[in-house]
Image (spheres, rainbow, N blue to C red):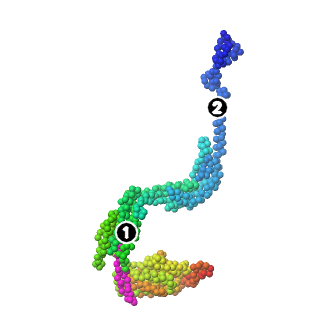
Amino acid sequence: MDTDAPQGAEAHDEPTRTMTGEAGPEHDVERTEWIPVTDQDRGHTADGSPDGSPGRRRPVLIGAAVVGLLAVLYVGDLLFSSTAVPRGVTVAGVEIGGMGKPEAEQTLRTELASRVERPVTLQAGSNTATIDPQAAGLELDVEGTIAEAGEQPFNPWTRVTSLFTTREIAPVTRVNAFALGQALDGARPQLDRPAVEGTVRFEGVEPVAVPSVPGQAVDGPGAARAVTEHWLDPTPVALPVVEAPVTVTAEGIQEAIDQVARPAVAGPVTVVGDAKNATITTRAITTFLVFRPDGQGGLVPAIDEPAAIAAVEPQLATTEAEPRDATLQFSGTQATVVPAVVGREIDWARTFSGLVEALGRPAGEPAPPVFTPPPAAPGAEPASPPPASGRAINAVYTTTQPEVTTEQLQALGPAEIIGEFTTRGFKPDSGQNIRRIAEIVNGKVIAPNSVFSLNAATSPRNEANGFVPAGIIDDGAPGRGVGGGVSQFATTLYNAGYFAGLDDVEHKEHSYYISRYPAGREATVFEGSIDLRLGNDGPAPVYIRTQWTPSAITVQLYGIKRYDVTSEQGPRTNQTPPGTRDLGGDPECSPSQGSEGFTITDTRVLRDVRTGEVRREPRTVRYEPQPTVTCNG
């Protein structure tokens, strides 16, 4: 058989081989050309394991080399950055990651320098306020902040991700808790919002719903934490708040509109007075009809009494009468009693007690007729009108007693002057104030066991009450003020009380001596702080009579004489010459002569007219030297 490949056979066809005994080397080579590749020829042993040849170990070596390189890089990076702030760290928006700690500290101080001094804006809902960080006890702790960033992480994955991410660290703050609390309390009026309960208001005469608005109050501890953590942020510090709930519901408001407000303005209301009626128009009703929460989600109607009075009183003013005090009518030194007159006025609280009910009644009924009470017996109350019906109410009247009654003055018996004093010399403007205060005090009565206060009787001493600007002494220098000159009246009244034997409950002398007054026996007043008070410890009232002329003011006290009173004055001691005070170019400067300072003792000697017993009341007064005022400029 021919051992050569058949002519025309394909190269991949397996040849046909014939074994004819042993073959030589050359022949073996020729024969192995056609032996198929086995698993052993692919680098595996007969049992299938790798044969360990160099070509087969290359991937393992490359992998090991990469791991080793990464390990070297990791260790090197760790050693290189061991003293630095971890990468990606920011504080209040300032990047310090990867910096050495000294550099990071300096960066924070530089970048945050302006922020630690600027006002901190606080925000609670839509309300804002600012606080001063220094006054609030806030101080940036730079070293503590760097420490808060921590040390370098050992986790390789963390180190890799830090190259692409940031980590915000809250600044560490040293806080004075007390100062911060005070600062937050001071900001509360701007941050807190009270709850506003819903109500009904009127546009013209049309009722309109006003929805409830919940309130808010800043959570104190939470606000302190928020400020401590975020005061250096570039945005306002958001503060936690506690909501203040409301009770009035939308349904409750609508019910009040339908059942109360609309019927109330359906027509006018009549107020029946004595011989005259008043009409409350629908427009006027809208000024005093108000609504308040009932605590159950709804509203209840109420009357704003001052507004209702304003709508009605002018119409019924002629039905009221002011009380008139009893007075003394003088003929020379003889006095007769002019009896007091009891007044009559409307008791508005009782009058309006049925107004809400009347507002709920249907409109359309005719107004009630005018009620004219029949004549009443002496001392009896006038008759009342019949009960009102429909949209009408009755005015309720009450009597008002005079301050000075007929009985008080009759108790004087044969009244006589028990104390009298006159002072002279005042300028026209001061004289106007003296005249006005004398008018107010004239006719006042000091009841037994009571005290008369000049400030209480004449305040307010302002232009609306008839007082005008006039001369005063201001810190030793002449000046001007409303009510100037009333101290002259106080001195006159004080001396009248002095000689009447009234109790000196309170009085104060001028700081400087004024020559037209008795030394050590005079008084000044200042509204709200310095008063003249005289007490009556006797069994009968004391009546005050004043007499003013353009050049003098006289005060007479009428009553039952109890004492003969004299004054004993000691010598002037500790005399001190006046200094000089130059007010320069002050346009209001008024030059004046000074006066010396001195000390003096005045003794009031009281002899009881019934027993003859004598009582002495010494009082020592120190007057400061009044400087000589110049205006040299």
Mark 2: few/some/many CA within 10 Å (<14, 14-19, 20+):
few
Q: Kindly identify the residue that appears in the image at 57 percent across and 54 percent down.
A: 233
Q: Is residue 347 rendered magenta in the image?
A: yes
Frontmost of labels 2 and 1 is: 1
Residue 499 appears in the picture as rendered = no
Estimate the x, y position of residue 110 in percent, counting from the top left: 64, 55
In the picture of the structure, the residue carrying the numbered disc 2 is: 60
**Please, what secondary structure does the residue beneath circle 2 have?**
helix
Q: Are marks 2 and 1 in contact (CB under 8 Å)?
A: no
Is residue 63 placed above or below 353 in the rendered structure? above
Find out whether residue 278 is within the magenta segment: no
Q: Which residues are magenta?
A: 325-349
Q: Position of residue 280 (x, y in %)?
A: 37, 68
Task: Assess disc 1: are there few (<14), some (14-19) or many (≥20) residues with their C-alpha within 10 Å of its C-alpha.
Answer: some
Q: Residue at x 44, y 60 (%)?
A: 196
- Circle 1 is placed at which residue position? 280
Position of residue 422 in the picture relative to residue 61 (left or right): left
Does label 2 or label 1 sit earlier along the sequence? Answer: 2
Q: Position of residue 483 (x, y in %)?
A: 49, 79
Q: Amino acid at mark 2?
A: Val
* Nearer to me, 166 or 137: 166
Q: Is residue 310 above or below residue 188?
A: below
Question: Which quadrant holds the C terminus?
Answer: bottom right
Q: Nearer the viewer, residue 79 or 287?
A: 287
Of 505 and 413, the residue lying toward us: 413
Q: Describe residue 532's horizontal placement relative to residue 50 as left or right.
A: left
In terms of image quadrants, where is residue 248? bottom left
- Tell me the kind of residue under disc 1: Ile
Corner quadrant of residue 135? bottom right
